[in-house]
Image: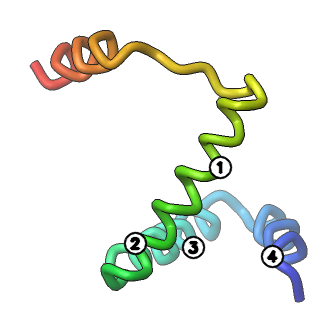
Amino acid sequence: MTVQHIEKEVLKLNVISRSKLARVLLSSLENLSETENEILWAKESLLRHGEMVKGTLKSKPAKLVFKNARAILK
């Protein structure tokens, strides 16, 4: 069974069941080892780098990102 097949089947569930499943899945990510976290971040950074090189991901200046973050935290 592939991830795509599981996704297709899960999306057939009602909203309450999907919500419960989402909570379980997100909770399972909280207990990753340091190595697992490093691997996931490395994969994500490579993906984003590739998107930036292709021009499919737009960047924002750090100054603007921090300004927006500070505004949200106030």
Q: Earlier in the sequence, mark 4 or mark 1?
A: 4
Residue 10 screen position, x and y as percent:
77, 70
Residue placed at 27% from the left, 12% from the top? 63
In the image, 4: left or right of 50?
right
Vertical comparison of 41 with 70: above or below: below
The span from disc 3 to disc 2 (Cα, nearest Å) is 21 Å
Q: Earlier in the sequence, mark 3 or mark 4?
A: 4
Residue at image mark 2: 37
Question: What crowding class fits label 3: few (fewer than 14 Cα within 10 Å), some (14-19), or many (20 or more)?
Answer: some
Say what amino acid the circle numbered 2 marks. Answer: Asn
Residue at image mark 3: 21
Pick the residue in front: 56 or 10: 56
Label 1: element kind = helix
The span from disc 3 to disc 1 (Cα, nearest Å) is 26 Å
The span from disc 3 to disc 4 (Cα, nearest Å) is 15 Å
Residue placed at 61% from the left, 42% from the top? 48
Which is more foreground, mark 4 or mark 1?
A: 1
Q: Earlier in the sequence, mark 3 or mark 1?
A: 3
Q: Quadrant of the C terminus?
A: top left
Residue at image mark 4: 3
Vertical comparison of 20 with 62: above or below: below
Res. 15 mark: none
Say what amino acid the circle numbered 1 marks. Answer: Leu
Residue 54 screen position, x and y as percent:
78, 30
Label 4: element kind = helix
